[in-house]
Amino acid sequence: MDQLPNLGREQEMLDIMGVSSMKDLFEDIPVEIRSEGTLPLPPPQTEEEILRDAERLLGANVNLDSRPSFISAGLARNFVPSMVPMIATRGEFLTSYTPYQPEVSQGMLQAMWEFQTMISELVGLPISNVSMYDASTSAAEAITCAVRVKSKKVDMPNTVYISELVPPHRMSVIENYTQGVGIDIRKIPHDEDGFLNLNIAAEASGSCAIYVEQPNAFGILDEGLLRLREVVGDKTAIIVGVDVTSLGIVEPPGNWGADIVVGEGQPFGIGPTAGGPIYGIFACKKDFLRLMPGRIVGQSIDTEGKTAYTLTLSTREQHIRRHRATSNICSNETLIALMGAMHMALLGPVGLETLSTRVLSSTRMAIDELSSVEGLELAFPKSPVFREFAVKVPGKSSEALSHIFELGVIGGFDLGQWWPDKGSWILIGCDERTSESDISLLKKSLTSWVEESS
Amino acid sequence: MTDTIFDFNGSKNAGWSQPSPLTEDSPSHIPESMRRNRLPDWPRASEPELVRHYTKLSQKNFGIDTGFYPLGSCTMKHNPRLNEKIVQNPGIDRIHPLQPEAQVQGLLAIYYEMQEMLAICSGMDAVTLQPVAGAQGEFTAIRCIQEYHRERGDNHRDKVIVPDSAHGTNPASASMCGYQIIEIPSAHDGRIDLDALRSAVGEDTAAMMITNPSTLGVFEPEIAEAAEIVHSAGGQMYYDGANFNAILGKTDPGRMGFDAVHYNLHKTFSQPHGGGGPGSGPIGVKDHLSKFLPSPLVNRKELPSGDIGTVGDGFWYHWESPASTIGKVQQWNGNAGAVVRAWAFYRRYGRDLERMSEHAVLNANYLRFRMMNPNPDLNIHAMPIEGCPAEVVKHEFTLSMSPLKDVTGVTGKDVAKRLLDFGYMAPTLYFPQIVPECLMFEPTETESKEVLDKFAEDFHAILAEDPDIVLTAPHTTPVGRVDEVWAARNLILRYPKDEPSS
């Protein structure tokens, strides 16, 4: 109740208005629909009490930093520089609304314009918005955007081809976002090395778009995708989902023909934070600009010709275009994108390359160590990977993970949860924080599982 | 002009110091053709430079912490700092959404408590915390309603009704689900026109989307009749929870006859707006829609007596998938950080959340009274503004600047820009569109009487000012009025150096 400055002064204010009681302010609610009595909730608490309860409840969770952890599956157990949360949560940023009044929002607007530039540079495409909710909604809205742009120009309107290795939770988001507008989704299989089957991908030629991920759900970097443009022809939009960290050493999709690049921005800016708030990146070629979702900041001038920034191309958006808007997105993830911008700026180009190399190195070291364990099998031993790789274990992966958790290691993700036929596969994820001793503990605990289960 | 972040010339190749990679040869594991040739042209700046850069930017940004933020329909209330402290806890910041239930019992307990609390406050039966914004909540609820109709074989219902005063997200969300939008006009006082509604409903009606109090801040007394009309036609009633701050503990969407509702945790429950996000838009539904909710929800079961469980309350918390779930709308389980902040906020009020709404409504009515009744000494003879005729308003209210414009040429936008000079955020401008030259004010419960008094006084001073000063405002902000047309014509959307082509 310490949040109400006028508590105890109600009557003074009512008297000025000539209203006799607080009750009169709610007389317009018909009696039949008024609530009765007090809300059946616990009594109010003080800051001190809430903090105590929060620490008790959150302290009951096992946090990823408390032991060696190898769970990733689309989110990174990253290291966020101390400056980032400290400066990004300055009240002027934290407590501002969408910058609809540019004259008093130049700070966030400029920061987002710089963010757009950094994302553009990262993925090799000229346009970026100021964020989507996450990688999945970004992929889904990239698909609906591509259909809007391409449907009238291709032989297969409303048809999109998608890699069958897109994880089921992302596919579910995509299905929810595309079913209403009647988009026909066709799947493209991958071959035994985990690479996209380019012969079947060629069928996407003449459709609105093809959506692939690089790396894919098993962490595999697919060299064949560099030929995707010649495979699908000029008319079909290529949409690529990326691991943003990989782009310090891996060629950005904008350089090999992608029209739209999406992905999870989280590795830059914020911890995995139980899945949100995180942010999706969305970058595209100029042909997609006027039909793309999300807010965009443009440079402008003020009345005296001074450089200024403002939201632009708002006529695409719901508050103006209503049911004809390119998307319903209003609130996005600006503050998290700001954290991302700060993290990217601090890294700089060389820092990005180093970070990328660190993640790749720890992945390689984990692969090398685990491949020497008798009884474990790499699912795709020949394929280059980034951050993640799949391992087949004896028995069920869920049981293997419980076993190694007892030994103090969060060992990865049970792929049986995504694909029931992969119930003995574990997706192991590495990152910049993975140490040699983490890897040796993982190896030791998995070895123990192999012995246990034989 | 402040330099952009790309104009720094210090520490050219140093970059941020990091530990060395575990191995030296790792890049050789990536085929040569796939390796990046040219690094992105990111800033090359040191931490001291960047801290100063972003601090300077923050000083050119207006937040609730800076001053009064009466932005209607946005509920810009104070954001308690306790909430920010709590989400720095590694028990939320360093948690992965795919960790097994046994490792996240505390988080699941918070989710469960929030689901229950939101259901209680709204008169709904089940709640999902997965949607991450109000618009996504709308989309999710309309998806559930769509599946409900489909399951009953009601496939011909292809229209969603929205009043012309609705938030733009309502029609946009329904449209993304494939619905045609039927917009019905509001009555002159902003209320639902029941006759227009009667003639709009039919066998093709899937749902009606509406907020109450309306976007004019007026409670809709005939809401139960409206629900009856839509239900009789076989449609579902959807409550846009953007204005929920007005009614907690006083009434609820369940009593009004709604089947589904979204909540804006970033409005009612103080998740900071962050310059445009993150938000959080959970939805609540009645029983008949609950099996379609996104997956998963949190449930709990009692442990055998003597077993207090991980969080010490005798329960085991677990994820559960609704029987006919629509699946996922966000990749994971929603904006957990926003849910935890909202939890900390609600705990501050508990059963007294009603006081919060009372004070939001008190402040709105008080400010409206003050703005409509200037101090006689000011010598404003005829108030050049028009208020909404309602006797009382709820948490927000609209004023039309039409009379002022007729007399002086000063528009609502000019007044809004002039308010910036006085150290205020502008009110919501030109919404709802049914009010000419509309300004919409929502003071929230966290402003003191003195702030409201001073604001009304400054507002009247602006009305009495030389129109030329107002027409050219703002004058004291970091930049003058920004040319939005120039921006749209020139489309400079990134730092121009070495721009990728196409």
Image (tube, coloured by chain):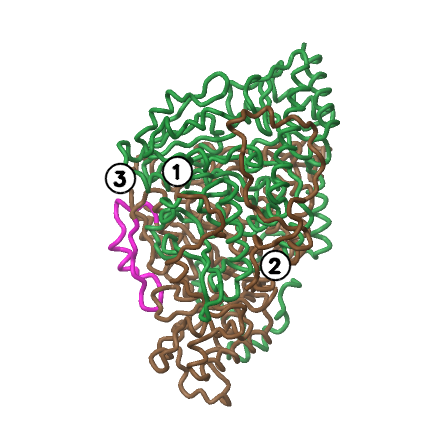
Residue closest to the eye, B263 or B226: B263
Which marked residue is nearer to the observer: mark 3 or mark 2?
Answer: 3
Q: Could you say which chain is coloured brown in the image?
A: B
Q: Which span is picked out in magenta?
A: B181-207
Left or right position of B440 against B421: left
Residue at 27 percent across and 38 percent down: it is A153
Spatial CA distance of label 1 from label 2 is 36 Å
Residue closest to the eye, A1 or B496: B496
Q: Is there a contact, CB below 8 Å, between mark 1 and mark 3? A: no
Q: Where is residue A372 in the image (x, y as percent from the top left)?
A: 68, 14
Q: Which label was assigned to residue A143?
A: 1
* Chain ID at mark 3: A
Question: Which quadrant of the rendered structure holds the C terminus of chain B?
Answer: top left
Q: Residue B98 magenta-drawn?
A: no
Q: Where is residue B373 in the image (x, y as percent from the top left)?
A: 47, 82
Q: Mark 3 points at which residue?
A: A152
Q: Which amino acid does label 3 sit on?
A: Lys
* Chain ID at mark 2: B
Mark 3 crowd level (few <14, some 14–19, many ≥20, 10 Å Cα): few
Q: Where is residue B144 in the image (x, y as percent from the top left)?
A: 41, 40
Which marked residue is nearer to the observer: mark 1 or mark 3?
Answer: 3
Q: Could you say which chain is coloured green in the image?
A: A
Q: Name the residue under label 2.
A: B79
